[in-house]
Amino acid sequence: MKLPKRFRLHEAAGSGGTTGDYVEAIRADGGRLISVGTASLAVVPILASDERPGADLPRLAAGESRPDALIAPKAIAEATRGTKGEGRLQIGPESTEVTGGDGKPWVRFDNPVGSFPPIDDVLELTRRPSPAGHRHVEVCLDAEALARVARAIGAGEAVRLRFLVNETTGRCDASGEAHGAIEVRPVREPDAGSGVLMAVVVS
């Protein structure tokens, strides 16, 4: 399987070990790669060799079967190393062999053993229609810029975002009185510093 280096699923899974009753790992679940941390969840599709040509997503080689295994986060980290290209993973039932985009030799990682948390119920929560008395809102952010602002104001652990939302669209954008400026403050010390991030405009 080819893995474009921009998919750094190991960063959501942490550095190894266990999370509660579950092993910390990346799950290859047929058509998905799934990463779970103590407060995070990331899901990336796995495409067949001839599916959605040109899409920059994890992709199986021709004739390669869809994987079903737990993968060590360090294996994904190894696959995303290098300054260009894409990593490759050969996922087996007991181990995963990896090479990064830098062309270094294959490295073998034992697959973790243990239980993986059920994630479909959590994903379903984000897909349900808004219940009575609630509504979904949407904001598009530059993730790297948000991280830089958070570090600049000393909010390395958590930030609070405050922004106007267009009542019609439910989005934070630059339409009407919703100017698209997002206030960023530390959660623990809201008066310790503040920043502003502009919403990304998506056409």
Image (cartoon, grey):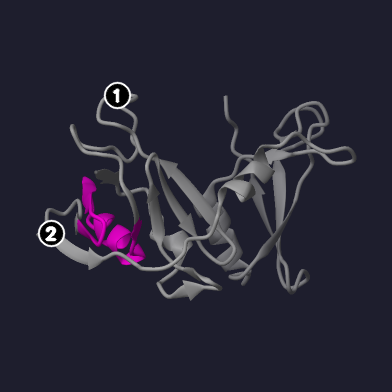
Residue at horizontal 47%, vertical 74%? 18
* In the rendered image, the vertical position of residue 99 relative to residue 61, given as above or below: below
Residue assigned mark 1: 53
Taking the image as shown, residue 163 lies to the left or right of residue 111, namely: right
Near mark 2 (Cα within 10 A), the count class, few <14, some 14-19 or many ≥20, is some
Q: Which of 160 and 125 is in front in this view?
A: 125
Q: What residue type is labelled 2?
A: Trp
Residue at horizontal 39%, vertical 39%? 31
Position in image of residue 147 (x %, y %)? 54, 59
Boundaries of the magenta span: 70-97
Determine the residue located farthest toward the left in the rendered image: 105
Residue at horizontal 54%, vertical 54%? 41
Q: Residue 106 carries which label?
A: 2
Please tell me whether residue 39 belongs to the stretch shown in magenta: no
Q: Nearer the viewer, residue 100 or 171?
A: 100
Taking the image as shown, residue 45 lies to the left or right of residue 199, namely: left
